[in-house]
Amino acid sequence: MKRFKFNYLLIGAVTVLLAVALWPSIPWFGQAENRIAAIQERGVLRVGTIESPLTYTLYQGKQIGLDYELAEQFAHYLGVKLEVTVRPNIQELFDDIDNGRADIIAAGLVYDTQRSQHYRAGPAYYSVSQQMVYRMGSPRPKTLAGIKENQLVLSPGVTSLSALNKLKQQKYPDLSWRIDEQHSSTELLQQVVEGKIPFTIADSVAISTFQRVHPQLAVALDITDEQPVTWFSALDSDDSLSAALLDFYNRLNSDDTFARLEEKYLGHVGDFDYVDTRTFLKAVDAVLPELQPLFEKYATELDWRLLAAISYQESHWDNQATSPTGVRGLMMLTKNTAQSLGVTDRLDPEQSIEGGSRYLKDMVAKVPDSVPKDEQIWFALTAYNMGYAHMLDARQLTAKQKGNPDSWADVKTRLPLLSQKQYYSKTTYGYARGHEAYAYVENIRKYYISLVGYLLEKEKQEAQELKYAEAYPVVAPVELAIPSFGPFPLGPFSQDGGLEKNHSAWPNTLLPKRPQSP
C-alpha cells in the first residue's frame, strides 16, 4: 500500500493563489448575506460526517477523528461552536447539503468530476485509492470479470460508482453490483469479514485501518488510482466559505498542524502484517484478560492500552521472557534498571509492570516541553529503546536537516540515519541502532491501534447482546452471541553505558523514506 501524505506544497500554493483572488471581493466578516456571515450569526458550524475510526468516532466518551479535529479547529477559526451530525451513508450527507441542513460534509470523501459539478470541493488534504476487498480464505477474483451477479455490494453515494460505470462501459459489460441502502461502507466491510457478502469497495486508508482489527480482510483489486480527499459544501455564487477554508488550510499548513494530524491518524497506514496482527489479537483474547487489571492499576495517567501494547512489543506478554542480553519479564527490565526501581523479581508480572510504567513516566517527564504533549510518548519510547542521549542526537540531526525537532513525523525519519557513519560521526553521542528504535515505536503504535479498535468492537458487541437479552429475557445472553470477529476466539527503559539499550523490534515495519541531507 502506498504511503499517504498531505500535499503540503500544493495546499500552500493553491491556497495562497485562490485566497488572494477571492479575498478582496469577499468581505465576509461584515456582510450578513454571505454564508460565512450566516454561520457566525447562527453561532454554529454544522458539519455532517460518517462514523469511522478515521473520520469521527467516540472513544472513552471523547470525540476523535481526523475530520472531526479539522472541523473543530475550523469552527474555532470562525469563532463559532461545532455541531456534528452523523449519517449512515454518503448519500444522506449530500442530501443534508441539498436541503440546507449542513454547511459542510467532512467524511473522508473523494473528489471526482461528477461531485464537483453539483457541490463545491474544498482543499485536498490526503489521497486514497478505491479497492475491492474480500475475506481471506475465500476465492479471490483476478479481475472484475470474475464478479458474479449480487456478489459486489456497495453503500449509497460512494465514489467508486463512477469508476465502476466507466469500467462497465469500456471493459466489463457483464459487471453488476447491488446498492445496500441500509448500511455504510464500514458496515459492509464488517459483512465481508463475517462472510455475509463476498465483496465490497472502500478507500485504501479505511481498509488499512479496518485490517488492524480484522486482519482477515484482504484486498482483491485496485479499482482506481489515488484520488484527493476533500470536504464538500453547496455550489452557488457565494464563495465566502471557500475563501475561509483556503485561509484556514493555509494557516494549518504553515504551523505544522497538518503534519501532526497526518502522523496521528495516517502514520500507521501501510505495511500491514496479517500473521503478526492475527497473533496479537489472539493474545488479546487468551492472555490479556489476566494481565489487564495490572496494566489498569499501574498505568495511572497513561492509557493502560498503550502500556499493554508496549509490554506486548517487549515480551509478547510472556512473564518468563528472557533475552540473550539478560533483560527479563513482561517489561523486559535490565538488572540495573530493576534495582534502581526497587524491583526485586523481574519475572513477577506485577513488579515488572509497575517498574516499567514508573520508568516510562520518568522518561516522558524528561522530554522537552516544546514537544506537543500527545507526541511526547513517542520520543520517550525512542529513548527507552536506544537511550535518551541518542534521542537527543536524532532531534539535533533533524534540526540540521531543516526539519522540526519537536515533530515526531520529522524526527522518526532521521532515526535510521544514526546507524550510518556519515551521520552518526557528526552527532554528540555517536552510533545508535536507530532503525530498530524506529521499528520499535511504530510496532507499539500499531499494536495500540489494534487493541483500542478490537476492545471497542467487543464493547459494542456486548452492549448489543445485552440489549437483545433485555428484549428477550428468557434467552440467556450467551445464546445470543453475535459473531463479529471472524475466526478469532474472543529491557527496556535502560541505557547501556548510560547511552543505549535496544529492545525487541519485531520486523513487521518497513524503514521510512530517507530524508535528504542538507
Image: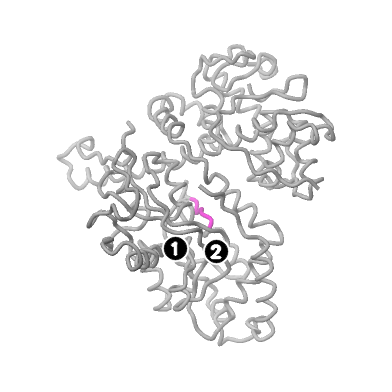
Dot 1 crowding, Cα within 10 Å, few <14, some 14–19, many 20+: many
Residue 387 is labelled as: none
In the picture as drawn, the residue positioned furthest to the front comes out as 171
Tag 2's secondary structure?
Answer: helix
Label count reads 2
Amino acid type assigned to the residue bearing label 2 in the image? Ala
Residue 67: x and y in percent read: 52, 59
Residue 450: x and y in percent read: 46, 39
Vertical arrangement, residue 70 with respect to residue 509, above or below = below
Q: Is residue 230 left or right of residue 288?
A: right
Q: Is residue 65 magenta?
A: yes
Which residue lies under the disc numbered 2? 71
Tag 1's secondary structure?
Answer: strand
Which of 385/304 is in front? 385
Say which quarter of the image contains residue 11: bottom right
Q: Please tell me which residue is depicted at 39% across the width and 62% down the height of the picture.
A: 160
Q: Which range is magenta? A: 62-66
Q: CA distance from mark 1 to mark 2?
A: 10 Å
Q: Are marks 1 and 2 in contact (CB under 8 Å)?
A: yes
Vertical arrangement, residue 128 with respect to residue 355, above or below = below
Dot 2 crowding, Cα within 10 Å, few <14, some 14–19, many 20+: many
Residue 49 is labelled as: 1
Q: Is residue 182 magenta?
A: no
Q: Is residue 328 left or right of residue 494?
A: left
Which of 80/245 is in front? 245
Q: Earlier in the sequence, mark 1 or mark 2?
A: 1
Name the dominant secondary structure of the magenta segment.
strand
Which of 119/351 is in front? 119
Vertical arrangement, residue 422 with respect to residue 148, above or below = above
Residue 129: x and y in percent read: 47, 56
Q: Please tell me which residue is depicted at 67% across the width and 34% down the height of the picture.
A: 382
Residue 397: x and y in percent read: 79, 41
